[in-house]
Image (spheres, rainbow, N blue to C red):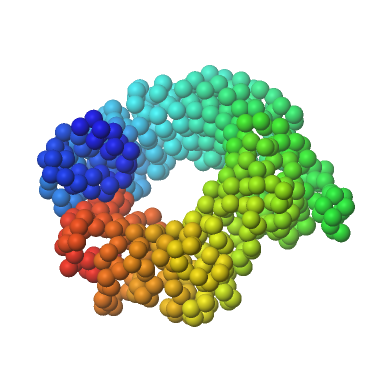
Amino acid sequence: MSLLISQLGQKTDNIDIICFSLVCKRWYNDRDKYLLFNTDRIDLLSLNNIDINQNHNHFKLPSYNNILLKSIQSKTKCKLFIGKIKYNTFDYHYDDVRNLKSIPNNVSDIYFTTNEYTEDDMEYLYRLISESQSVTKLNRCKTLKYGLPKSIKSLKYEYGVDEPLVKGLLPNSLEVLVLEDRNFKQEIPPGVLPDSLRKLYLPNYQYKIQPGVLPNGLQKFSMDGYRHEIQPGLLPSSLKSLGLTSYTSELREYLRYSFNPTTFGDSREPKSYLPISWLHAISSLSNLRSLYIFIPLSSRHDTTIFNLNYLPPTLEKLDITLQGKESILKGTMPTSLKRILLVDCQFKFDEIFPETLQYHLEIFYFINDSFIPIPPNIKIDSLSVCGETIKSTISLPSGVRSINLYMKSSGSDENNIDFCGDGVADQRCSLRELRLPTFVDGPPKVKLPKTIEYLDIGNNNLNDILHLIPSTLNTLVFENQSNNNFSIPNTIKSINNIIYRFKSYETLSIRKLDNNYYLLYSENEGRLRSQIFHQSKLEQMLKFR
């Protein structure tokens, strides 16, 4: 039994948990002894009261009703929404704060949806919150003058809050601080942010950040629109993640600098949009693992270069968006990188990934209207390419396990996609997971490799893709399905896992139990839908709306 519980603890999806309990008769009979559902996405849905309300009328598994109720009753990380605006997903929701007599002990997260309360109501509410011993996360906080609970770990400021931050106001338990209001005009003095702080988001900060403002233990720091130098030693060496994002106006001219055209063998004289002091600060961070840079179109007018040579050798994730007239990557990518996301950046593989160095990327995402040949010194586990319509043959690189195509493809002949770089779709292909492009000229005649185990048909209609599905497929993901009658081929009936994304954030999973029965399961907007059905109803279930 202990081994069973250990194995079950590694499974976080409830559909997996249910299937696991159905493996054998003994496990099924003992399910009440060891089984609990993951309630992260199952809501209590209690309005203006603290009663446990199961409220899941579409959960059609009577044998698991007691387990569901026990799981809900034992939920300890509940969400409390306060405000006139009602959401579809919540554990507790109070639109009248005076109906709330205390914060339930199982509430960890509080969200404010509106500000339509009197000052007396706000004081009453914040007093209740400050007395709580369970609240760890407070979203859209309006004021700190009534104190914070000692258990607080995460705090997100409300828009329009402009209270000065003074030493001792933020408790030592605080780990995450988000000053989301771009109109926040208070300067943060040194020593105000607690030493416990690990994550800080600071948008549109108009003052120079002084030494001692950022705690030495800070691990993640993001700032928007900062328009000053970053002095040496200002960023703590403990930083593992840094984000420089969303510039809404041009950087002051004295912070910009030009490259010598001969530096990168280019006849143009481009400028760097990041100040040299920022690049020096980035390169000095010996523990940096993740770097995110976003510069929007409105702030770019010149040909600009991002010099990769300033990236520290510890960096594992690089996410860069450089919109504008012409944005070029130059220099050498560090070999420590595992994840790279490049948006609106021009680059040449052989320049930023020199053939004398070896790279192993877990994820590589870039935007391009054509497939660029991948050099042999770059091993990629998952490749995602986004672009416009491709009119020529899509030649997929060999040696990649997962490929996602976020683009349109014209043409419908059998050469529409060239797998493995040689036109052959057989067991020699290393491809296991594939997201198809959108076929704009109708169903293609392409033959998918039998090595594919996971297929996401993207924006295509399921009816148009049925003929492509290989018999060896294990998981099928689709978004569009017409209401026309269609006959399910045997290749579909042999698939163990079918996932229907009927909205961008809602999914329905169908898991094959045996040759006769399937398990349907979904957790959408906090509500459950689950049932076991006969294989004769599979077509009906695939038309779910």
Q: Position of residue 211 (x, y in %)?
A: 69, 24
Q: In this view, does 524 lie to the left or right of 425?
A: left
Residue at 67% in and 43% down: 334
Farthest residue toward the front? 428
Residue at 49% in and 62% down: 429
Quarter holding residue 20? top left
Q: Which of 72 and 202 is in front in this view?
A: 72
Q: Where is residue 435 in the image (x, y as percent from the top left)?
A: 46, 63
Q: Is residue 97 visible?
A: no
Q: Where is residue 223 in the image (x, y as percent from the top left)?
A: 62, 39
Quarter holding residue 121? top left
Q: Is residue 466 visible?
A: yes
Residue at 43% in and 69% down: 448
Question: In the figure, 488 relative to 511: above or below?
Answer: below
Q: Nearer the viewer, residue 78 or 261?
A: 261
Q: Is residue 165 left or right of residue 83?
A: right
Question: In the figure, 409 relative to 108: above or below?
Answer: below
